[in-house]
Amino acid sequence: MRPITRLRSVRISTSAFDRSIEFYSKGFGLVLEDRNQDVAYFAGARNQSGILELHNGSHDALIGLTFTMATVEDLRTSHRFLSSRGFETKSAFAGEGIGFEVADPDGNRISFTLDDGIPDERPTDDGRPLFLSHVVLNSPDAAKLTSFFVDVLGFKIADRYEKDLLSFLRCAQKQHHCIGISPGPKASLNHFSVDLGGIDALMRGVGRMKKAGFEPIWGPGRHGPGGNVFCYYEDPSGFVPEFTCDVIQIDDEDKWVPKEWPRVPDIANVWGTGGPSKRAVELMSGHRGE
Ligand SMILES: [Fe+2]
């Protein structure tokens, strides 16, 4: 498997399609790039297109994630590698949309496409999301899913909470993690996170959300593992999008020693401004709708 350079996009199916388009383009601050009756595509405020795809569906579920690789040759080599390991792959290596797709052990569709360059990470004056930072997945077999990302796709464990309550995984980039895996009752999206480029921009985003009538379900605060500032919201179909910034950048891979963090309130939020609301726990844990 060749190195994965970044997490590029998250694709979700929503039963509240029109209201979600309004939520993400107005208060949340993404740029609506294109839409039809079935799909809506959102970009960041600068040069990152397609960071969120909303699919008009009868239920609310994660469809898949898109990661990038540096070259077409990396994509081809990785496609051959996964095929040789018995993974069923769909591929396209001609024309536009070069890349391939594979299902992870939980059935999430994991796509790979060509990296089109480092995102412009300068915050905007009005505090808008710039690029997709990370996602956290809930899994009924978190050890198996983690093994898929680490042993098959080549991710590295950056840090984890005690008792394997949440593992943070890094691809071939400096950012501490672009994916997290948490045990859950069923495969689901715990949350996804967009980076706003700085604390001031993040707080302007929080202000814009407030004016649009949306209060955080957790935050603002700062996490211990990953070091990032966070603020979590509830979207119209119960997905949890997060504003983030200041994720730790690992400059020297060889010197990084993954830690096992205690699962205590002052580690989950080192500012001490409070833990997740009951609603946040319900929505993020994967117990929703049970
Ligand atoms: Fe997060």
Image (tube, grey):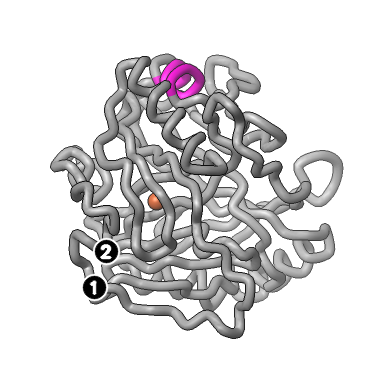
In this rendering, position of residue 215 left or right of residue 46: left
The relative height of residue 130 versus residue 73 in the rendered view (above or below) is above
Measured from the top left, where is residue 235 in percent x and y?
Answer: 34, 28
Kind of element beneath mark 2: helix
In this rendering, position of residue 90 left or right of residue 11: right
- Identity of the residue drawn at 45% across and 16% down: 22
- Identity of the residue drawn at 36% across and 21% down: 16
Measured from the top left, where is residue 136 in percent x and y?
Answer: 40, 54
Q: Quadrant of the C terminus?
A: top left
Can I make out residue 136 in this image? yes
Residue 24 magenta: yes
Q: Nearer the viewer, residue 274 or 5?
A: 274
Q: Which amino acid is tagged 2? A: Ile
Residue 46 magenta: no
Q: Which residues are magenta?
A: 20-27
Mark 2, residues whose alpha carbon is within 10 Å: few (<14), some, or many (≥20)?
Answer: some
Can I make out residue 91 in this image? no
The relative height of residue 46 versus residue 187 in the rendered view (above or below) is above
Residue linked to disc 2 = 267
The relative height of residue 9 versus residue 252 in the rendered view (above or below) is above
Q: CA distance from mark 2 to mark 1?
A: 7 Å
Mark 1, ligand 1, within 8 Å: the answer is no
Q: Which amino acid is tagged 1? A: Pro
Measured from the top left, where is residue 51 in percent x and y?
Answer: 59, 38
Residue linked to disc 1 = 262
Measured from the top left, where is residue 43 in percent x and y?
Answer: 62, 30
The relative height of residue 124 versus residue 191 in the rendered view (above or below) is above
